């Protein structure tokens, strides 16, 4: 099982980075050795997680990290994208937890020794519960608490990290967590969602100068997710509906970075739900970034509706196991659109992948295998779309598969598997899927 690219593909150039990504709460476990975060609290809420599970053990990465680094080395990745657990490395007093920081220092040093570049995200959704108790991201003070955390942890980790990202997917933290409540902390308020989004972006802008001063040799950026909005028809009302949805769900998080404003969303956001924006906030948010991380999985189709827009289910379209439509050309079109709209720095595709209904079988030698040919096809199609975008002038420097291994998939618990490596959650055995072997073969080809 392998990927197929022309010999002159930009993806085969030595300068292009291939890697795999994870997030702290999803893989680390080790609940007893850190303070509570909002996802611990959310997991304890009846009905919040589909299978009633939590992240107390997850993939037990806190104990098995050396084996996981060996796995990365075997896959011959150029880089590994991981996140720092804020409640593992910080104390409520605002000081660093030496034991928590030491875990990441040892992990990063070992990755460096194996020649693996490191892309570190400072916030991948696990807000310390003590900050949520004070209002969380709806409280403006949390932005300044994040800046303090970012300052201290980048000083501690320093040049062990090649690229820092302030946040992963502010949309998910604000909209899913504070606006519709299907993610932690489970709040349901349009005003809260928009205010949380503003404070997250403010925190990003406050932290960037500190991070850059602490580690000038590293790249510094942010990771945004995009779900392109398509109209259900060429009718003007449907086109307008898709445009409103695109502004509300996608451009809301990038417009302030480059254009110092929020996009127009018609009547979908009433005046009393607009965030409170203080003078100078947009100047802070629009700090220069060295790279933009782009996460892509699927698209959404919209039609006009009295409320502004409504989602049209693509019932006959191919979908992944989590129910997301497989539509690779939306990936190409998204990248070209962003390239056209904004004066972008280099892009890294920081997440792309698919949940599939993986099954463990035995190969001819009686060894366990996971023949995820559907996931390999998904990756091939999206890497082809990436090449097409690059041919249209989009500057992309790297690609990270989501994810390195099956893990705690947030509100889905352990029901959905995105990994290129299969995890048996009872034994914690790792099994390279066909998709992992395809990436391994690609790296061998690129280095050959």
Image (spheres, helix red, strand yellow):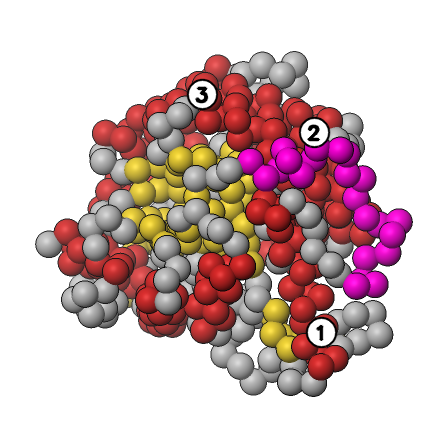
**Magenta stretch in the rendered image:** 266-287
The residue closer to the viewer here, 341 or 331, is 341
Residue 212 image point, x, y percent: 46, 27
Secondary structure of the residue carrying numbered label 2: helix
Q: Which residue lies most toward the right here?
A: 272
Task: Please report the residue visible at 17 percent of the width from the left and 55 percent of the height from the top.
Answer: 446
Secondary structure of the residue carrying numbered label 3: helix
Q: Residues within 10 Å of mark 3 (few under 14, many from 20)?
A: many
Q: Residues within 10 Å of mark 1 (few under 14, many from 20)?
A: some
Q: Is residue 280 magenta?
A: yes
Residue indicated by mark 1: 240
Residue 111 image point, x, y percent: 29, 33
Tag 3–tag 1 contact (CB < 8 Å): no
| Residue 32 visible in the current orientation | no
Q: CA distance from mark 1 to mark 2?
A: 35 Å
Q: Main secondary structure of the magenta part?
A: loop
Residue 132 image point, x, y percent: 73, 32
Task: Please report the residue visible at 34 percent of the width from the left and 51 percent of the height from the top.
Answer: 398
Q: In front of the other: label 3 or label 1?
A: 1
């Amino acid at each position: 099982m392998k990927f197929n690219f022309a010999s002159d593909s930009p993806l085969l150039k030595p300068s292009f980075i291939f890697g795999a990504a994870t997030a702290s709460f999803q893989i680390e476990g080790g609940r007893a050795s850190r303070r509570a975060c909002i996802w611990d609290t959310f997991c304890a809420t009846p009905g919040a997680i589909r299978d009633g599970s939590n992240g107390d053990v997850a993939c037990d990465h806190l104990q098995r990290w050396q084996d996981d680094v060996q796995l990365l080395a075997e896959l011959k990745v150029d880089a590994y994208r991981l996140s720092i657990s804020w409640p593992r490395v910080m104390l409520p007093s605002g000081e660093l937890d030496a034991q928590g920081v030491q875990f990441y220092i040892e992990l990063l040093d070992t990755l460096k020794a194996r020649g693996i570049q490191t892309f570190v995200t400072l916030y991948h959704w696990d807000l310390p519960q003590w900050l949520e108790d004070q209002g969380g991201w709806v409280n403006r003070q949390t932005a300044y608490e994040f800046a303090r955390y970012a300052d201290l942890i980048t000083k501690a980790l320093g040049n062990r990290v090649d690229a820092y990202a302030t946040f992963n997917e502010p949309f998910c933290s604000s909209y899913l967590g504070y606006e519709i409540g299907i993610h932690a902390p489970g709040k349901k308020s349009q005003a809260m969602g928009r205010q949380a989004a503003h404070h997250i972006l403010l925190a990003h802008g406050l932290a960037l100068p500190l991070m850059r001063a602490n580690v000038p040799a590293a790249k510094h950026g942010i990771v945004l997710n995009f779900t392109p909005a398509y109209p259900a028809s060429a009718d003007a009302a449907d086109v307008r509906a898709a445009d409103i949805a695109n502004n509300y769900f996608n451009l809301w998080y990038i417009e302030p970075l480059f254009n110092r404003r929020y996009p127009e969303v018609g009547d979908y956001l009433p005046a009393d739900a607009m965030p409170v924006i203080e003078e100078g906030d947009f100047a802070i948010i629009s700090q220069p970034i060295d790279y933009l991380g782009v996460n892509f999985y699927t698209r959404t189709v919209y039609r006009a509706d009295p409320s502004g827009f409504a989602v049209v289910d693509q019932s006959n379209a191919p979908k992944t196991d989590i129910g997301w439509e497989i539509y690779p050309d939306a990936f190409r079109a998204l990248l070209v659109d962003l390239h056209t709209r904004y004066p972008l720095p280099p892009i890294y595709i920081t997440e792309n992948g698919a949940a599939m209904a993986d099954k463990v079988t035995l190969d001819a030698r009686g060894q366990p295998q996971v023949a995820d040919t559907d996931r390999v096809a998904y990756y091939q199609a999206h890497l082809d779309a990436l090449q097409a975008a690059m041919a249209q002038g989009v500057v992309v420097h790297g690609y990270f598969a989501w994810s390195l291994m099956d893990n705690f998939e947030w509100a889905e618990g352990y029901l959905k598997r995105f990994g290129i490596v299969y995890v048996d959650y009872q034994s914690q055995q790792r099994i390279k899927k066909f998709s992992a072997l395809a990436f391994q073969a690609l790296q061998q080809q690129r280095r050959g």
